[in-house]
Image (cartoon, rainbow, N blue to C red):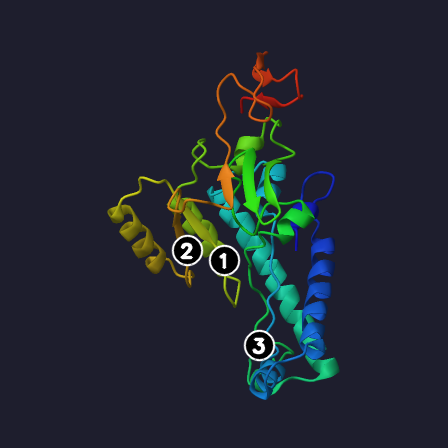
Amino acid sequence: IDISKLLNEDRTIDLLSLELVTRLGINFLDSIISRSIYPTDDIYKWAINNRAIGLGIMGLADYFLKRKIIYGSPESLEELEFIMNFIYKIAEDESIILGEELGVPSACKNLPNPRRNITLLSIAPTGSISLLAGCSSGIEPIFSEITNRKDTTGTYQLIHPDSNEDYFRCAVSSNGIKEVSWNEHLLIQNSAQRFVDSGVSKTINCPNGTRKKTIYDLFLTAWKLPYIKGLTVYRNGSRKEEVLTPKNLKKDMCPVCGSELVKGVGCKKCDNCGFGLCDA
Protein backbone atom coordinates (compact mmCIF):
# COMPACT_ATOMS: atom_id res chain seq x y z
CA ILE A 1 0.00 0.00 0.00
CA ASP A 2 1.49 3.33 -1.07
CA ILE A 3 0.20 5.46 1.79
CA SER A 4 1.72 8.61 0.31
CA LYS A 5 -1.07 8.52 -2.30
CA LEU A 6 -3.86 8.19 0.28
CA LEU A 7 -4.22 11.81 1.37
CA ASN A 8 -7.19 14.15 1.30
CA GLU A 9 -6.95 17.66 -0.13
CA ASP A 10 -6.25 19.01 3.36
CA ARG A 11 -3.33 16.54 3.70
CA THR A 12 -5.10 14.34 6.26
CA ILE A 13 -5.06 10.61 5.67
CA ASP A 14 -7.97 9.22 3.66
CA LEU A 15 -9.14 6.43 5.97
CA LEU A 16 -11.97 5.34 3.67
CA SER A 17 -9.55 4.72 0.81
CA LEU A 18 -7.06 3.06 3.16
CA GLU A 19 -9.77 0.68 4.37
CA LEU A 20 -10.81 -0.14 0.81
CA VAL A 21 -7.25 -0.78 -0.34
CA THR A 22 -6.54 -2.92 2.74
CA ARG A 23 -9.59 -5.11 2.17
CA LEU A 24 -8.74 -5.49 -1.52
CA GLY A 25 -5.15 -6.36 -0.61
CA ILE A 26 -6.19 -9.10 1.81
CA ASN A 27 -8.55 -10.62 -0.77
CA PHE A 28 -5.89 -10.44 -3.47
CA LEU A 29 -3.15 -12.05 -1.37
CA ASP A 30 -5.45 -14.81 -0.15
CA SER A 31 -6.46 -15.58 -3.74
CA ILE A 32 -2.80 -15.93 -4.71
CA ILE A 33 -2.42 -18.80 -2.23
CA SER A 34 -5.23 -20.69 -3.96
CA ARG A 35 -3.92 -19.91 -7.46
CA SER A 36 -0.22 -20.59 -6.88
CA ILE A 37 1.67 -23.65 -8.09
CA TYR A 38 3.78 -25.29 -5.36
CA PRO A 39 6.98 -27.31 -5.96
CA THR A 40 6.26 -30.03 -3.35
CA ASP A 41 3.27 -31.51 -1.57
CA ASP A 42 4.67 -30.51 1.83
CA ILE A 43 4.89 -26.85 0.83
CA TYR A 44 1.40 -27.03 -0.64
CA LYS A 45 -0.05 -28.52 2.56
CA TRP A 46 1.66 -25.92 4.74
CA ALA A 47 0.43 -23.06 2.57
CA ILE A 48 -3.16 -24.30 2.51
CA ASN A 49 -3.24 -25.12 6.23
CA ASN A 50 -1.86 -21.70 7.23
CA ARG A 51 -2.66 -19.36 4.35
CA ALA A 52 -0.04 -16.90 5.61
CA ILE A 53 -0.07 -13.53 3.85
CA GLY A 54 1.76 -10.24 4.36
CA LEU A 55 0.18 -6.95 3.33
CA GLY A 56 2.50 -3.99 3.89
CA ILE A 57 3.12 -0.31 3.25
CA MET A 58 5.58 1.83 1.33
CA GLY A 59 5.94 5.54 0.77
CA LEU A 60 6.14 6.32 4.49
CA ALA A 61 8.83 9.00 4.13
CA ASP A 62 6.87 10.65 1.30
CA TYR A 63 3.76 10.54 3.49
CA PHE A 64 5.62 12.31 6.30
CA LEU A 65 6.99 14.81 3.79
CA LYS A 66 3.57 15.76 2.45
CA ARG A 67 2.18 16.10 5.98
CA LYS A 68 5.25 18.04 7.16
CA ILE A 69 5.99 15.45 9.82
CA ILE A 70 9.65 14.98 10.74
CA TYR A 71 10.93 11.42 10.22
CA GLY A 72 11.88 9.90 13.58
CA SER A 73 10.09 12.53 15.67
CA PRO A 74 7.54 11.59 18.38
CA GLU A 75 4.79 12.81 16.06
CA SER A 76 5.98 10.47 13.29
CA LEU A 77 6.01 7.48 15.66
CA GLU A 78 2.48 8.25 16.84
CA GLU A 79 1.26 8.65 13.25
CA LEU A 80 2.91 5.41 12.11
CA GLU A 81 1.40 3.42 14.97
CA PHE A 82 -2.04 4.86 14.19
CA ILE A 83 -1.72 3.83 10.53
CA MET A 84 -0.46 0.31 11.23
CA ASN A 85 -3.05 -0.28 13.96
CA PHE A 86 -5.81 0.82 11.58
CA ILE A 87 -4.53 -1.42 8.78
CA TYR A 88 -4.21 -4.43 11.09
CA LYS A 89 -7.75 -4.09 12.44
CA ILE A 90 -9.20 -3.84 8.92
CA ALA A 91 -7.03 -6.72 7.68
CA GLU A 92 -8.11 -8.94 10.56
CA ASP A 93 -11.76 -8.10 10.02
CA GLU A 94 -11.52 -8.91 6.31
CA SER A 95 -9.74 -12.20 7.04
CA ILE A 96 -12.51 -13.15 9.49
CA ILE A 97 -15.11 -12.42 6.80
CA LEU A 98 -13.17 -14.53 4.28
CA GLY A 99 -13.01 -17.35 6.82
CA GLU A 100 -16.78 -17.29 7.21
CA GLU A 101 -17.27 -17.29 3.44
CA LEU A 102 -14.52 -19.64 2.25
CA GLY A 103 -13.56 -21.61 5.34
CA VAL A 104 -11.02 -21.38 8.15
CA PRO A 105 -7.81 -23.42 7.64
CA SER A 106 -6.69 -25.84 10.33
CA ALA A 107 -3.91 -23.63 11.75
CA CYS A 108 -6.33 -20.74 12.29
CA LYS A 109 -9.20 -22.54 14.01
CA ASN A 110 -7.79 -22.09 17.52
CA LEU A 111 -7.15 -18.35 17.18
CA PRO A 112 -9.16 -16.08 19.53
CA ASN A 113 -10.95 -14.87 16.38
CA PRO A 114 -10.80 -17.68 13.78
CA ARG A 115 -9.94 -16.26 10.37
CA ARG A 116 -8.74 -17.18 6.92
CA ASN A 117 -5.03 -16.33 7.34
CA ILE A 118 -2.55 -17.14 10.10
CA THR A 119 -0.55 -13.94 9.48
CA LEU A 120 -1.79 -10.72 7.89
CA LEU A 121 0.86 -7.99 7.68
CA SER A 122 4.49 -7.75 6.63
CA ILE A 123 6.61 -4.78 5.54
CA ALA A 124 8.89 -5.59 2.60
CA PRO A 125 11.88 -3.59 1.29
CA THR A 126 9.95 -2.61 -1.90
CA GLY A 127 13.16 -1.36 -3.51
CA SER A 128 11.96 -2.03 -7.07
CA ILE A 129 8.18 -1.73 -6.82
CA SER A 130 8.50 1.63 -5.07
CA LEU A 131 10.24 2.89 -8.22
CA LEU A 132 7.26 1.72 -10.27
CA ALA A 133 4.86 3.38 -7.84
CA GLY A 134 6.91 6.56 -7.66
CA CYS A 135 7.32 6.64 -3.88
CA SER A 136 9.91 6.12 -1.16
CA SER A 137 10.70 2.50 -0.34
CA GLY A 138 9.08 0.69 2.58
CA ILE A 139 9.42 2.59 5.84
CA GLU A 140 12.89 3.90 4.96
CA PRO A 141 13.71 7.63 5.12
CA ILE A 142 14.69 9.84 2.20
CA PHE A 143 18.46 10.16 2.37
CA SER A 144 19.04 12.72 -0.34
CA GLU A 145 17.19 14.87 -2.84
CA ILE A 146 19.30 13.22 -5.54
CA THR A 147 20.32 9.55 -5.50
CA ASN A 148 22.49 7.59 -7.92
CA ARG A 149 21.01 4.16 -8.65
CA LYS A 150 23.00 1.36 -10.26
CA ASP A 151 21.41 -1.89 -11.42
CA THR A 152 21.48 -4.29 -14.37
CA THR A 153 19.91 -1.65 -16.63
CA GLY A 154 22.64 0.89 -15.99
CA THR A 155 23.39 3.88 -13.76
CA TYR A 156 21.04 6.81 -13.49
CA GLN A 157 19.98 9.60 -11.13
CA LEU A 158 16.76 9.78 -9.18
CA ILE A 159 15.66 13.30 -8.26
CA HIS A 160 12.94 13.54 -5.65
CA PRO A 161 9.98 15.46 -7.11
CA ASP A 162 9.56 17.53 -3.94
CA SER A 163 13.24 18.33 -3.41
CA ASN A 164 12.69 22.03 -4.10
CA GLU A 165 9.85 22.41 -1.61
CA ASP A 166 10.64 24.35 1.56
CA TYR A 167 9.40 21.45 3.69
CA PHE A 168 11.61 18.81 2.05
CA ARG A 169 13.94 18.50 5.06
CA CYS A 170 11.01 17.29 7.17
CA ALA A 171 11.31 13.89 5.50
CA VAL A 172 15.00 13.56 6.17
CA SER A 173 15.75 13.75 9.87
CA SER A 174 14.43 15.12 13.13
CA ASN A 175 17.71 16.81 14.01
CA GLY A 176 17.85 18.84 10.80
CA ILE A 177 20.83 17.12 9.15
CA LYS A 178 21.13 14.62 6.32
CA GLU A 179 22.03 11.59 8.43
CA VAL A 180 19.16 9.87 10.20
CA SER A 181 20.43 8.64 13.57
CA TRP A 182 20.40 4.92 14.26
CA ASN A 183 18.11 5.57 17.21
CA GLU A 184 15.56 7.20 14.89
CA HIS A 185 15.75 4.16 12.60
CA LEU A 186 15.09 1.83 15.53
CA LEU A 187 12.17 3.85 16.89
CA ILE A 188 10.47 3.86 13.48
CA GLN A 189 10.92 0.11 13.12
CA ASN A 190 9.69 -0.54 16.65
CA SER A 191 6.52 1.48 16.04
CA ALA A 192 5.83 -0.35 12.77
CA GLN A 193 6.50 -3.82 14.20
CA ARG A 194 4.06 -3.28 17.06
CA PHE A 195 1.12 -3.99 14.77
CA VAL A 196 2.81 -6.26 12.20
CA ASP A 197 2.44 -9.96 12.98
CA SER A 198 5.12 -11.03 10.48
CA GLY A 199 8.43 -9.34 9.67
CA VAL A 200 9.47 -5.72 9.06
CA SER A 201 12.29 -4.96 6.64
CA LYS A 202 14.51 -2.15 7.94
CA THR A 203 18.10 -1.22 7.15
CA ILE A 204 20.02 0.87 9.65
CA ASN A 205 22.44 2.91 7.56
CA CYS A 206 25.56 4.00 9.42
CA PRO A 207 28.42 6.31 8.35
CA ASN A 208 31.60 4.69 7.07
CA GLY A 209 33.53 5.60 10.21
CA THR A 210 31.06 4.01 12.64
CA ARG A 211 32.89 2.28 15.51
CA LYS A 212 32.27 -1.20 16.91
CA LYS A 213 31.02 0.30 20.18
CA THR A 214 28.28 2.15 18.28
CA ILE A 215 27.18 -1.05 16.53
CA TYR A 216 27.14 -2.80 19.91
CA ASP A 217 24.98 -0.05 21.41
CA LEU A 218 22.70 -0.18 18.37
CA PHE A 219 21.99 -3.90 18.67
CA LEU A 220 21.64 -3.73 22.44
CA THR A 221 19.10 -0.91 22.11
CA ALA A 222 17.18 -2.87 19.46
CA TRP A 223 17.13 -5.91 21.76
CA LYS A 224 15.71 -3.81 24.61
CA LEU A 225 12.92 -2.31 22.50
CA PRO A 226 9.69 -4.30 22.96
CA TYR A 227 8.68 -5.09 19.37
CA ILE A 228 11.71 -5.35 17.08
CA LYS A 229 12.26 -8.90 15.78
CA GLY A 230 15.37 -8.37 13.66
CA LEU A 231 17.23 -5.76 11.67
CA THR A 232 19.98 -5.12 9.15
CA VAL A 233 22.93 -2.78 9.67
CA TYR A 234 24.82 -1.44 6.67
CA ARG A 235 27.97 0.67 6.93
CA ASN A 236 28.13 3.09 4.02
CA GLY A 237 31.04 2.38 1.70
CA SER A 238 31.60 -1.16 2.97
CA ARG A 239 31.10 -2.46 -0.59
CA LYS A 240 32.92 -1.32 -3.71
CA GLU A 241 29.66 -0.97 -5.63
CA GLU A 242 26.39 0.07 -4.01
CA VAL A 243 22.90 0.04 -5.51
CA LEU A 244 21.97 3.44 -4.08
CA THR A 245 24.36 6.27 -3.22
CA PRO A 246 23.30 9.78 -2.16
CA LYS A 247 24.54 12.47 -4.51
CA ASN A 248 26.87 14.95 -2.79
CA LEU A 249 25.74 18.50 -3.48
CA LYS A 250 28.58 20.93 -4.10
CA LYS A 251 27.81 24.40 -2.83
CA ASP A 252 28.00 26.28 -6.15
CA MET A 253 27.73 23.50 -8.76
CA CYS A 254 24.59 21.90 -10.18
CA PRO A 255 24.47 18.21 -9.15
CA VAL A 256 22.60 17.32 -12.36
CA CYS A 257 24.61 18.96 -15.17
CA GLY A 258 27.63 20.40 -13.34
CA SER A 259 26.93 24.00 -14.33
CA GLU A 260 27.33 26.89 -11.92
CA LEU A 261 24.38 27.58 -9.64
CA VAL A 262 22.97 31.09 -9.64
CA LYS A 263 22.24 32.40 -6.15
CA GLY A 264 18.89 33.94 -5.31
CA VAL A 265 16.98 34.81 -2.15
CA GLY A 266 17.18 31.59 -0.13
CA CYS A 267 17.65 29.50 -3.28
CA LYS A 268 20.20 28.40 -5.83
CA LYS A 269 19.15 27.68 -9.41
CA CYS A 270 20.80 26.23 -12.49
CA ASP A 271 19.97 28.26 -15.60
CA ASN A 272 21.27 25.43 -17.79
CA CYS A 273 18.97 22.55 -16.76
CA GLY A 274 16.50 24.22 -14.40
CA PHE A 275 17.52 22.41 -11.21
CA GLY A 276 16.84 24.41 -8.06
CA LEU A 277 17.74 24.02 -4.40
CA CYS A 278 16.20 26.08 -1.60
CA ASP A 279 17.25 26.26 2.05
CA ALA A 280 14.81 24.53 4.43
Q: Residues within 10 Å of mark 3 (few under 14, many from 20)?
A: many
Which residue is located at x 51 percent, y 46 percent?
Answer: 243
Q: Residue 226's x, y, as percent?
A: 39, 61
Seen from the viewer's position, the closer of residues 106 and 208 is 208
Which residue type carries mark 1?
Ser
**Residue denoted by label 3:** 118
Residues tagged 2 and 1 counted as in contact (Cβ below 8 A): yes
Which residue is located at x 66 percent, y 73 percent?
Answer: 95
> In the structure shown, which secondary structural element does the residue marked by tag 1 occupy?
loop
Image quarter of residue 121? bottom right
> From mark 3 to mark 1, how far is it between C-alphas?
20 Å
Q: Is residue 75 left or right of residue 14?
A: left
**Residue denoted by label 1:** 201
Which of marks 2 and 3 precedes in the sequence?
Answer: 3
Q: Residue 173's x, y, as percent?
A: 47, 37
> In the structure shown, which secondary structural element does the residue marked by tag 3 occupy?
loop
Image quarter of residue 271? top right
**Residue denoted by label 2:** 232
Residue that protrudes farthest toward the left in the picture: 213
Seen from the viewer's position, the closer of residues 17 and 211 is 211
